[in-house]
Amino acid sequence: MHPFPRPPDPHRPCHSKPIQQFRSKRQPSSPLRRLRPLLALLGLLFLGAEAQPAHGASAADLELRIKQIDEELGQLAEYSLRSGVGPVGYRSKAHTEAESPEWIQIDLQDVATIDQIVLVPTIWRGKKSGLHADGFPIEFQIKAGIAPDSHGQVIATFQASDSRLPRIAPLLVPIDPIEASWVRLEASVLSPRIWDGLYILQLSEFLVFSGEENVALHQPVITPTLSQALTSSRSREYLVDGFVPYVMDGPQVEQSLAFTTFTGITPTPILTIDLGETVPINRIHLHGPDLSDTIPQALPDDYGIARHWLAEGATHADFSDATPLFEYKMNSIYDVGPIIMWRFPEKVARYVRLVALKPYLGKDHLGEGPQIALAEIEVFSQGKNVAVGKTTTANFNRIPRERSLLSLTDGRNFYGEILPVREWMEQLAKRHDLETERPLILAKLNEHYAAQSRNLKRMGWLAAALTVGIIITILVDRMLRMREIASIRERFAADLHDELGANIHTIGLLGDVALKSLHDPERLQTVLERNRRLTERTGTAVRHCINLQEAKGLYGSLPDDMERTARRILTEIRYEIKIEGEKHLAALKPKERTDLLLFYKEALVNTSRHADATFCEIRLVATDKQITLSILDNGRGIPNSLINDSPNSLKRRAKLLGAKTTTELAPEGGTLVRLNYRLGLFRFLKK
């Protein structure tokens, strides 16, 4: 141990800080850092995959909408279609062209404030297409006016682009309230009827609402085509008879069995309803019995319906002040339907009775004779059924227990709740809209599911690719680390060899000169001083064994270093140095200058050791694109094995610099070493 503490050395040993600094600057990046571009690419691919199935709404929104639609559908009336025989509606004459004008006008008789129109299509059962509207107009407008004005004003317009077809539901035409005494539908483009393809205008019912009142019921109808015979199921009068192609099938509540009974020997069966108070009434609905749901049905549509009904109202129970309300006669099988609707001028009454002047004559397992069958009797006052829950009496006693008179005013039929006609039509139209929307939403939802499935599959592949990428990156990173370690070792060895080897060789030469100068004190002192400076320089190089280009004071300008190096190494050899383009040399990176100088040193050492030369010419030419270094000596030349080749030490240094070197015999004898270094576009990557 030293007797005194060793002062701190500003230059650490080569195995300490410089190596750590070098590694901190040049060490390969971590595998995670190398994966960043791959992770970014996978992220972009994932985001792109997520964005593909975009349709304006997310899958969650679409699922919520499907749930809402299903909930709404569960609260709406169903499409329960009639069976048996009945009136079909109105059909215009046939045309060969779609653009054939047709029109229908309803005369309301009195001026009314109307706020909604309902068009009920004629429904056809197609062989392949199923149930759909037949002859429903494609393009049309609806006008309304007050007589004697025959022009009126347009209150609604429909184009082919409105996509109303196909449908079996009624079409709602909401309008701003307007006073009118007539309403007219003018069709400009017709649709073909199914069975022969000719173009017609065909409807089952034309309803015009003023509040809850269908003011078109049983009103005169005007068309350009004359009405067909009463024996036909198609006539313009059937547009306003109140018979639609549906059976009222409202939201599911408690069911009710229709009232039906044989009246025995009673010649004129009568049903009487006590409304409980005197009210103004203007409409009565008679609901026919709910027939068998079998196909075909077991009973005719007119089962239990009197051929001649007389409806009367009175304020006294004995009907001493009876007033006729309406009279219904069944002239053909087309005068009956599920709901018989009659409007009449408003009357004030508390009691309402239905007199079967000509009852239905039935015959079944219960017996035969006059028979009454009804599901419900509705009596309306200002749009409201005031007969619900009221007492009904009869002038006959033959009533089976399971068929109570209470069922006539309980507000229900076999399917459930009896709805107001306007609400019934609105619910059927709403059902059509929702059932049309649902498959569209479901298709979009399926697209989302398909996109999610594709994304999931894609992400599986991406995950696999990422796993493979990570493995490859780790392997590549390891290989790069090994290569860089090898490169560090190679540079370390080259720097030691080229820098220290040249210095040690020079020290040896100076030692030889010193021995020869023992009798020349002045020269000996000069040689020893040079040797001392070279020894210190060598020590500095050892301390900075790798980062030689960063050692302060180790190197100066390249021309000065070349001159100093030649003077030290070529001690017994005359030399000449020619340098062109010094401004380009000043622009070299420190690493380039160091590698170039170390190559130069190694070449001079080889010349000093092996050439037996007496003169050496050194030429350095620098341009903005290339640096050429030539070292020519007049020695004994090179062995045959090195012709057109170079010593390994020179090739190694040239490789580190990224240059090319050649060694060849000079024409006048001796050896020519040449280094060509091209200044490429990527010099900025070199430190």
Image (cartoon, helix red, strand yellow):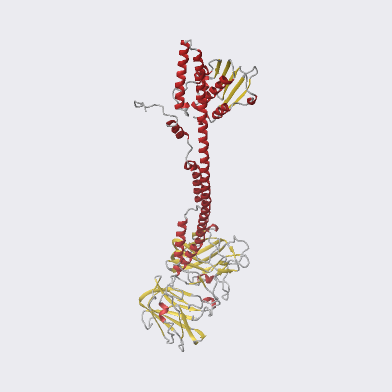
Q: Which residue reaches farthest bottom?
A: 265
Residue 628, x across and y down, in percent: 57, 22
For the image, the number of numbered tags is 0
Viewer-proximal residue among 90 and 168: 168
Residue 676 in percent (x, y) is at 58, 25
User: In which quadrant will I find the N terminus?
Assistant: top left
Residue 615: percent from the left, percent from the top? 58, 15
* Nearer-the-camera pick, 166 or 204: 166
- In the rendered image, is residue 142 in sight? no
Is residue 644 positioned above or below 357 on the image?
above
**Rendered image quadrant of residue 652:** top right
In this orientation, which residue lies closer to the viewer: 184 or 444?
Answer: 444
Q: Nearer the viewer, residue 439 or 493?
A: 493
Q: Position of residue 445 (x, y in %)?
A: 50, 58
In the depicted structure, whether residue 76 falls above or below residue 340: above
Q: Is residue 327 visible?
A: yes
